[in-house]
Amino acid sequence: MESLWRTGTSRITGTPFAPGSRSDVVVVGAGLTGLATALMLQRAGRAVTVIEAGEVAQLATGSNTGKLSLLQGSVLSTLRRHHYAALVKAYVDANRAGMEWLTGFAEEAGVPFTRRTAYSYAQTDAAASTVDDEFDTAREAGLDVRRVDPDALDVPFPVASAIALTDQVALDPARIAEALAEQFVAAGGTLHTGLRVTKVHTLPDPRVDTAEGVAFADHIVLATGAPIADRGLSFAKTSGLRSYCVSFTTDRPVPDGMLLSVDGPTRSIRSVTTGDGPAAGLIVGGNGHPVGRSESERAAVDDLVDWTRRYFPEAVETHRWSAQDYQSHDLIPFVGALPRGLGRIRFATGYGKWGLSNAPWAAIRLSSEILGVPWRDRPAWMTGIGTRLTVPADIAQGAVENARVGAAAAAGWAGALTTRTPVPKPAEGEGVVAARGVEPVAISTVGGETRAVSAVCPHLGGILSWNDAECTWDCPLHASRFAADGTRLEGPAVRDLEAR
């Protein structure tokens, strides 16, 4: 499963790694957050090294819908339900700053994008009140949203209620990341790809461990989606979420705007033009769920295809892909100094699938902190988000999610010990977990090869679940993912699964 965006991009491979090298800043991760932070710091005169385990924009940055919008479904009203208006406004202003920075960079680098109208809509009358709440909250936060007559949208699928925000942005996220990497290297930055960071140290000298040796720096930025360091228990304060996208060509008219439903099953729709993507067409996304906690990921993708063909009968599928992001329990990203990092390690996570606007403002904040910009010279939104309070609702939401994690852990171990080896050879594209003695083993058949690996996630010991859409082993506890042969793909885990 490869995204539409990554089919037309060049592969930026970086330079060979020199063990023992020293930089002012080491950034771990070459997605939007890491590259934007690195470019800001490099342009400010710092010597920056970016280390990426895979390729530029390989994960969430290159696998989203390419929608850059301040109208984000029901995020604002959900946030406002438990928090004061000033925090919601700070969140909106931060996202606006992120949008302005990214579009400004796109214009500078010659990356095309288009201005679109974004819509939050209800699929049924039962969800109309959610649209009303989003309208009220968005207006309170300073967004010029307007109500829309559903019939005026002229779309073939059901719309019971809708609001709109003009002058939002559609772009090719992989292309913008590629331009960031090129500009970073052109400014004198160092980029290493295909090199995994396995550990981060603060004392006696800040450094990162890699498979090829150590890299030293005065500051370290973890731009890895989920932090690969356990300090601060970020994995217990966020939830890993996976969602799906399918692109199509069609001869029928497609919506010109960018639409997102506020009720489930989630539907995210946008057209693609040659001004904001590699080819004209239609993207339909949605059906999100916690990582490793789906009866069938393949069924989730097939459902998007069926829904699209119901309303666009002539649509022809071209690509299908998935994306993973992390959502904080209070919907505000965590950005700043990592606890117990002595001010030398910083991180960003919890974008809740809105990384195109959240990542740039996170980079602005991270670079401001590293550069030592005085608080009085920082924008008000940075102070507002940085001093947010944890309220009872946040604690309750976190408790509920962690209870679900605990239940998933118990169910995983119980299921793994119930099925015993030997087991029938899995069919092509299938996987099963079974106990060999007292050890859970993950057995799968992919590409005609049957493999067995440890079924225990090396990050806190969750029992892995088979992802039948992507043929991967996914952890339902903290969202680490592994290929069928055990190779670590993403998440807080830093080690591969052991072969069995």
Image (cartoon, rainbow, N blue to C red):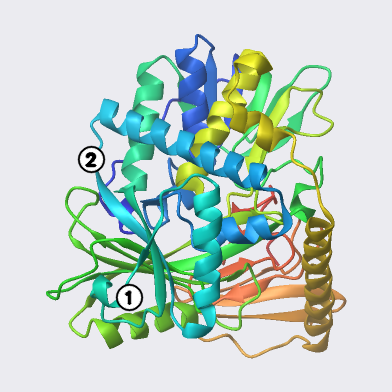
Q: Can I make out residue 194 in this image? A: no
- Reply above or below: 439 against 231: below
Residue at x 27%, y 30% (from the top left corner): 107
Report the residue that reaches farthest toward the right: 438
| Image x and y of residue 194, in percent | 50, 39
Question: What residue did someone put label 2 on?
Answer: 112
Secondary structure of the residue carrying tag 1 is helix
| Image x and y of residue 432, in percent | 65, 81
Please name the amino acid that badge 2 sits on.
Answer: Pro
Residue 270, quarter of picture: bottom left
Closer to the N terminus: mark 1 or mark 2?
2
Residue 77 appears left or right of 492: left
Q: Which sits in the foreground, 151 or 252?
A: 151
Report the residue that reaches farthest toward the left: 251
Question: What residue did someone put label 1 on?
Answer: 150
Secondary structure of the residue carrying tag 2 is loop
